[in-house]
Image (cartoon, rainbow, N blue to C red):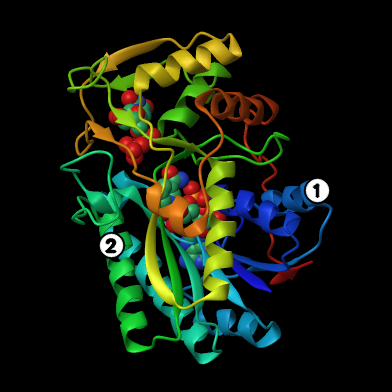
Amino acid sequence: MILIVGGAGYIGSHTCVQLLNAGHEIVVVDSLSNSKYESIKRIKEITGKEFKFYQIDLLNKNELELVFKENKFDAVVHFAGYKAVGESVEKPLKYYQNNITGTIHLCELMSEYNVKKMVFSSSATVYGIPKQVPIVETAPLQATNPYGRTKLMIEEILQDLYVSDSDWSIAILRYFNPIGAHISGKIGEDPNGIPNNLMPFITQVGVGKLEKLKVFGNDYPTVDGTGVRDYIHVEDLANGHLKALEKILASTGLDAYNLGTGSGYSVLELVNAFEKVTGIKIPYEVVDRRPGDVAVCYADPTKAEKELGWKAELGIERMCEDSWRWQSLNPNGYEVNELVTNTKTKQ
Ligand code: NAD
Ligand code: UDP
């Protein structure tokens, strides 16, 4: 039995589907602070499988403990955290409290209930301003904003935990830029308000919710002056969790892995790919650079291939096609604003 914390969210929901399809039994915990119960329903719809869902905040340790009392877990996949860089600069304590205290509560209970295996969602943001690309896992770590610092601190906490008790088995996954959606178009990324990230911004322009894309700077030292990132299909990312889970279930240790494709695309290359695949024109204007953005960031994913047997398979066209299918079938995301207030558990 695998506990998926933050499983109602974007990456978590895709991972739930893959774990269920691979025959794992799962329990999902999510506060729904940045997601909707509808995504849980859709995971069940896609897979035809049932699982327990608890609407619980990691900050509420007593409620979380009930989940450990009621279920016997083999491992935990931990996605739960706030992730908006800009908001983290404005409200650092909110981020430290949620991401770090939440993780500590989870680890304390895992330790107490002897569930010492975890896959943790980290981010390429822990590399700060990379000195070299492609980025290898041994590159210096440095965060440039409170969100990034929460990821870095959690990585260090997990490292200390492992040093203190070598029964732990931990895979830290450093994601590059996840985009795309499940091929059914039933689950996908559902940002609150105006998207901060490029792909949801593009798809919302495509569907007519936003007028035009603002390209943050075209004077970077890149192919066309716009920022370069390693976009990875969320299905490939989800598969990385499956592979990491297999590894931690079979061994002890702590390792960090880059999950990226190893290729970079500029903002305008992504816009062009999207237009080509969908036939939809994305009007854009170039504006100032966004403070804190790096010019180029892409992964060296060799370690994950060697040690996890994982490699990204889906290309930029599939990423665009699937992002668009999700957005066009669900112009308002999960839109069903159902409140889960009457009960803590929904089957
Ligand atoms: P998301 O917001 O869609 O999913 C996170 C889920 O965690 C949400 O459903 C939210 O309701 C839940 N959550 C947050 N705080 C919680 C708490 N205290 N208790 C219980 N549930 C809580 O985000 P995502 O894009 O799926 O990202 C998942 C993880 O991956 C996050 O930790 C994020 O920082 C990390 N990550 C994301 C990206 C990205 O670009 N999406 C990149 C790198 C790393
Ligand atoms: N970007 C942009 N306009 C937007 C959002 C993003 O030009 O509305 C650019 C951004 O400067 C970066 C790339 O797109 O070069 C990816 O940005 P995103 O926020 O998706 O990812 P991150 O910067 O966190 O890697």
Residue 101 in the image: above or below residue 193: below
Q: Nearer the viewer, residue 278 or 92?
A: 278
- Residue 205 is marked as none
| Secondary structure of the residue carrying numbered label 1 | helix
Q: Nearer the viewer, residue 130 or 226?
A: 130
Q: Residues within 10 Å of mark 2 (few under 14, many from 20)?
A: many
Q: Quadrant of the N terminus?
A: bottom right
The C terminus, quarter of image: bottom right
Q: In the rendered structure, which amino acid carries the disc numbered 1?
A: Glu
Coordinates of residue 126 in the picture (x, y in percent): 27, 54
Seen as rendered, the residue at the extreme front is: 306
Quarter location, residue 328:
top right
Res. 34 in view:
no
Relative to 210, residue 238 above or below = below
Label 2 is placed on what type of residue? Leu
Left/right of residue 7 with respect to residue 95 in the rendered view: right
Labels 1 and 2: the sequence-earlier one: 1
Q: Secondary structure under badge 2?
A: helix
Query: Under 8 Å from ligand 1: the CB of mark 2?
Result: no
Residue 189 percent across, percent down from the top left: 56, 40
Residue at 19 percent of width and 35 percent of height: 291
- Circle number at residue 152: 2
Residue for point 38% across, 32% down = 263
**Residue that carries the numbered disc 1 in the rendered image:** 45
